[in-house]
Amino acid sequence: MYPADTIVAPATASGLGAVAIVRLSGPRAFAILDAIFRPAHPGEFAPRMMRLGDVIDPATGARIDRALAFVMPQPASLTGEDVAEIQCHGGQFIVRRIVAIAVAAGARVADPGEFTRRAFLNGRIDLAEAEAVADLVAARSDSALANALSQLTGALSARVAEMRAKVIAIRAHLEVEIDFSDEDIRLPSRREVAAEIERLLADVALLHDSFARGLLIREGVRATIIGKPNAGKSSLLNLLLGADRAIVTAIAGTTRDVIEDSVQLGPYALVLNDTAGVRESADDVERIGIERTLRSARDADLLIAMFDSSRPLESSDLDVIRLASNRPGLAILNKRDLPAAISAGDLRRHGLTLPILPFSAINVEEAATLRAELTRAIAALVAPSAPTTGDQIAISRERHRDALAMALEALKNAHSAALSLMPPEIVAVDIMAAASALGAITGEVSGEDILDAIFRDFCIGK
């Protein structure tokens, strides 16, 4: 549990704004509001009804701000406790003063995430939904936003609860076999139990394997632009960003370090890395930049390989082709506005397998085509066999992945034990371990639901 005290904190971001919110939660929230807020008209606060008034310092009687305030009585509030909010003007000095007088009146400054934590502990949301709050705030693309909203509204929790209910049902049958083997009850055979576990394994594995896709949705797809010097990498970056983020000159080796920025393409966030040109160099600084290029290319989710169509193929182009081998991404055959020295066929004959887009990085009108091709490449990476509607559940937190991995291991052990016709006690141990691992995702781990399942599904007293 947590201390039964009252906490206060700004609920809006720091900085200047039209309106800021100061939130109180706890047993003394209403009393503290009464101490620091004077309604413009006498009367009691009605739940969830805004009232106009003045924020005052009880110690001096000084007026701090003209504001709005309202109350949300427990348990139907954000945290499950009494909650009060003051909507004041958005100056940071005003916000700090209101927090300070609330503390002087008996509140404590909230720890990071404490309002959401209290909401979880009071049963307003489960653990997966609580984590989705943070993901919602940190969302950097439409797909990340949709995934976080899906989890916040209980899609992941419902999926986990469904799987856990199946696990508990299997455990219930095993418990009945253990405790009531002399009763005239039709129980599934061990092979039937194994078949049910096998179906459950497929469901858990599907959710576990969604982690890679979910992480790409949540954090963005990392793309590294590679190519020989003066192939047009920095021009491409600037074109996608719509700003002069990278210096563009005709001097080879201008880009010495990895330049990172992000852009939204369709529903996805794309984190772009412009890199030093791939070539042999005697310059120590440039050589370090090239080493960072290679490291960035290895770590990237997809590659954008740039080739200069106005110049013959060189050894550095072949190095780029090797770097792109068996990697997802897009090849750009740049400078098609100039006389061609190489073609897409030349790149194919040297082993390039990426889709190839003839392009001119200085032609702004071609940016839409480039964005569309990159969006397709990202979609193929994020959801290669599913529509990109954002409806599919995808986990994006390592805690969820690890819990599902533990559930998978336990279910595999239970499946093997069932097929080996081991005693029901042995199978039941692994089944319960799977139920506990799944329950850890939502924070709902209990032994009472086993008994509930037994009495619901079987008439023991018969």
Image (spheres, grey):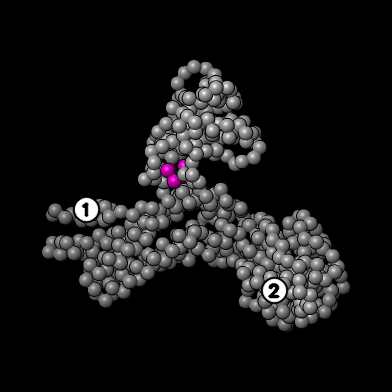
Looking at the image, which is closer to me, 106 or 161?
Answer: 106
Looking at the image, which is closer to me, 341 or 135?
Answer: 135
Mark 1 or 2, closer to the camera: 2
- Residue drawn at (47%, 42%) of the image: 115
* Mark 2 Cα-neighbour bin, 10 Å: few <14, some 14–19, many ≥20: some
Is 162 inside the magenta-drawn segment? no
Q: Where is 82 relative to 319, above or below?
A: above
- Residue drawn at (78%, 77%) of the image: 281
- Do the residues under discs 1 and 2 have CB atoms within 8 angstroms? no
- Residue drawn at (68%, 67%) of the image: 224
Q: How many marks?
A: 2
Q: Quadrant of residue 193?
A: bottom left
Q: Residue furthest top?
A: 42
377 vs 218, left or right, is: right
Rendered image: mark on residue 90: none
Cα gap from disc 1 to disc 2, whole angstroms? 65 Å
* Residue 417 x, y percent position in the rendering: 28, 73
* Residue 345 x, y percent position in the rendering: 75, 79
**Residue at the disc numbered 1:** 455
Looking at the image, which is closer to me, 134 or 368?
Answer: 134
* Residue 258 x, y percent position in the rendering: 71, 65
Q: Residue furthest front?
A: 59
226 vs 203, left or right, is: right
Region in magenta:
115-119
* Residue 23 x, y percent position in the rendering: 51, 35
Q: Quadrant of residue 237?
A: bottom right
